[in-house]
Image (cartoon, rainbow, N blue to C red):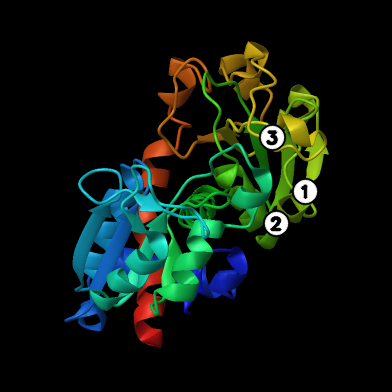
């Protein structure tokens, strides 16, 4: 595996889930693979779970780890070609990337959407420059449009806690005070489409995700209908994807608090389990009583980030 961005990169999901369970049973089994190998983690944006879980996974596999915060202590990087660099950006990404590649064996990149230029964001401009110019295998630690390590961890969590063979999984939009990217819901929808689940996506009209991520999921604008009989509720805010109205891309076009997941919402489900990628704005996305309930899986879900990343790094090391 030379890159990890979309669900197709992981191959057979059943084998990937079995491998995840194997690693969970013995996190240091493949420590020999990373001996004398270095992972470079490059952050253009803040991180808690991704930083900690990815570093822990790499260490479990015997790797050295270098962490670079681009916005804290590094030269400011220009990402566009043709720009006269007479501003505050001292180095171009096209020189920085191959230099980074000199110092490592694998690269993880985290770079969020700017939410102003849909074409630029959905072209994955920054990530693709790393793939093209680094000379190293590259995996996404959340990009402008996807967060595959999170979605893989979500799938592992659902697999561990499902009580029926083909559970009903609902991805629900919820209100937020800031404009957030679509990466998490995009990847969640993509991975659930590839898995054996009944996926329903619910959100206010105008918040439709890109069709390539919606796939075969059913879109239901009535949140109560969507929740009925659900086994898992995955709550997440995303800003307007600009699919139906391109001028609205990246904007907050709804703050409807009736979409906040509370006890009444969960009562519509089949004793449903609650999922969220974290960090979560309490009493905007979900109420205290729901996220603190026995049916909340947010902590096991976060713990599985170490496992999903371990599978990915292991496979990349095996391919070196």
Residue 287 visible in the picture: yes
- Residue marked by disc 1: 217
Q: Are marks 1 and 3 in contact (CB under 8 Å)?
A: no
The dot on residue 193 is: 2
Q: Residue at x 75, y 25 (%)?
A: 204
Q: Residues within 10 Å of mark 1 (few under 14, many from 20)?
A: some
Disc 3: which residue: 249
Q: Residue at x 36, y 68 (%)?
A: 95
Q: Are marks 2 and 1 in contact (CB under 8 Å)?
A: yes
* SS for dot 1: loop
Q: Measure the C-alpha gap from mark 3 to mark 2.
A: 24 Å
Instruction: Compute the Cα span from label 1 to label 3.
Output: 22 Å
Mark carried by residue 57: none
x 44%, y 74%: residue: 133
Q: Quadrant of the C terminus?
A: bottom left
Badge 2 or badge 1: first in the primary sequence: 2
Q: Earlier in the sequence, mark 3 or mark 2?
A: 2
Which of 177/102 is in front?
102
201 is higher (above) or lower (below) than 144:
above
Q: Position of residue 146 (x, y in %)?
A: 56, 52
Q: Nearer the viewer, residue 77 or 38?
A: 77
**In front of the other: label 1 or label 3?**
3
Determine whether the residue tagged by mark 2 lies in a helix, strand or loop: helix
């Amino acid at each position: 595996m030379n890159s990890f961005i979309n669900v197709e990169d992981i191959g057979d999901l059943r084998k990937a889930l079995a491998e995840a369970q194997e690693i969970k049973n013995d996190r240091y089994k493949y420590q020999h693979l990373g001996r004398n190998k270095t992972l470079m983690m490059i952050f253009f944006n803040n991180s808690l779970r991704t930083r900690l879980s990815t570093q822990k996974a790499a260490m479990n596999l015997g790797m050295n780890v270098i962490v670079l915060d681009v916005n804290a202590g590094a030269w400011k990087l220009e990402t566009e070609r043709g720009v006269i660099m007479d501003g505050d950006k001292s180095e171009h990404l096209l020189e920085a990337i191959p230099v980074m590649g000199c110092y490592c064996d694998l690269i993880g990149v985290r770079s969020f959407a700017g939410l102003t230029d849909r074409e630029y964001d959905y072209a994955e401009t920054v990530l693709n420059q790393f793939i093209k110019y680094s000379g190293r295998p590259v995996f996404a630690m959340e990009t402008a449009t996807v967060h595959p390590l999170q979605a893989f961890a979500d799938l592992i969590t659902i697999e561990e806690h499902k009580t029926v063979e083909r559970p009903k999984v609902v991805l629900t939009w919820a209100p937020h005070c800031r404009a957030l990217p679509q990466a998490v819901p995009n990847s969640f929808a993509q991975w659930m489409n590839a898995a054996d689940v009944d996926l329903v996506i619910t959100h206010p009209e105008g918040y439709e995700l890109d069709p390539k991520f919606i796939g075969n999921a059913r879109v239901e604008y009535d949140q109560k209908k969507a929740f009925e009989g659900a086994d898992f509720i995955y709550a997440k805010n995303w800003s307007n994807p600009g699919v139906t109205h391109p001028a609205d891309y990246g904007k907050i076009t709804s703050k409807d608090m009736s979409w906040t997941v509370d006890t009444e919402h969960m009562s519509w489900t089949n004793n449903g389990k609650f999922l969220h990628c974290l960090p979560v704005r309490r009493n905007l996305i979900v109420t205290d009583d729901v996220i603190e309930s026995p049916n909340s899986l947010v902590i096991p879900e976060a713990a599985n980030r170490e496992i999903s990343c371990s599978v990915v790094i292991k496979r990349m090391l095996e391919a070196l």
